């Protein structure tokens, strides 16, 4: 995302775009950004193409809502400034959840060479071809939202087998003594109470992992 697009996103948020739809005109937004309505229109179109905002356009203006992806960008920006201006010790966020059965998609995607290579490069090991699916308990759902402010690692999508495979992102974590990563697909609105975890070994059935209460630690 370009710096001027980030500034535009931040201005929409200050107008109330993170709390729900906000009604704006290109002229009013241009005044806030000290630029022209034409430039604002291009930036809004770009943000929409990147799925940072959703727009409903009428002749007298437009209704704009910042998406969850857009909120995540703003959270990460906030987190960066926090690290610059504070000297606090790192915080460990702990998520608790119960193991649930997935659809087997994690095993398929993690076995694809393109994804496997990228995960191996960023994690330092070849991940087990499968994911541990967890349904978070209610308190952990709120903690899960804080993860959006952290620095995630991007996994690029690709085209193959006559189809397109989307991008993803991962966040380093730890399950007991085992290093792993939380994986979130780049597409779709992923349920807030579900996370998928990968590791070098198959986590399900590992000694010390209680399927009814798995603790996932993330250092912020």
Image (cartoon, rainbow, N blue to C red):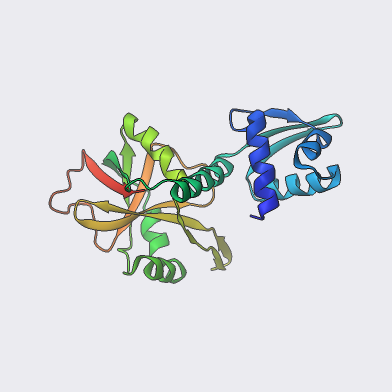
Residue 47 at x, y percent in the picture:
68, 47
Q: Is residue 146 left or right of residue 66?
A: left
User: Quarter holding the N terminus?
Assistant: bottom right
Residue 104: x and y in percent read: 36, 53
Count the marks. 0
Q: Is 159 placed above or below 203 here? A: below
Frontmost residue, 1 versus 130: 1
Instruction: Determine the residue positioned at 85% across, 29% down.
Output: 60
Return the x and y of residue 113 as percentages of the image width and height: 43, 71
Compare residues 141 and 2 and report the one nearer the observer: 2
Give the image quarter of residue 41. top right
The one nearer the camera, 152 or 116, is: 152
The residue positioned 45% from the left and 54% from the top of the image is 152
Going 59% across and 43% down the picture, which residue do you hit?
Answer: 70
Q: Tell me residue 196's x, y (percent).
A: 36, 49
Please say if 156 is above or below 57: below
Residue at (18% x, 52% y) in the render: 205
Q: Residue furthest left?
A: 207
Q: Is residue 88 left or right of residue 29?
A: left
């Amino acid at each position: 995302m370009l710096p001027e697009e980030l500034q535009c996103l931040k201005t929409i948020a200050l107008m109330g775009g993170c709390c729900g739809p906000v009604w704006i005109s290109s002229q009013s937004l241009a005044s806030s950004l000290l630029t022209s309505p034409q430039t604002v229109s291009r930036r809004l179109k770009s943000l929409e193409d990147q799925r940072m905002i959703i727009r409903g356009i009428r002749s007298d203006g437009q209704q704009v809502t910042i998406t969850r992806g857009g909120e995540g960008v703003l959270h990460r920006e906030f987190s960066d400034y926090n690290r610059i201006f504070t000297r606090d010790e790192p915080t460990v966020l702990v998520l608790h959840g119960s193991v649930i059965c997935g659809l087997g998609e994690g095993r398929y995607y993690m076995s694809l060479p393109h994804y496997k290579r990228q995960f191996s490069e960023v994690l330092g090991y070849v991940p087990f071809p499968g994911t541990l699916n967890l349904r978070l308990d209610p308190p952990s759902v709120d903690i899960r939202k804080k993860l959006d402010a952290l620095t995630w690692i991007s996994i690029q999508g690709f085209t193959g087998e006559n189809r397109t495979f989307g991008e993803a992102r991962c966040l380093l974590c730890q399950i007991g003594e085992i290093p792993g990563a939380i994986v979130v697909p780049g597409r779709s609105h992923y349920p807030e109470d579900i996370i998928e975890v990968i590791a070098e070994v198959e986590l399900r059935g590992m000694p010390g992992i209680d399927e009814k209460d798995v603790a996932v630690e993330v250092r912020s």
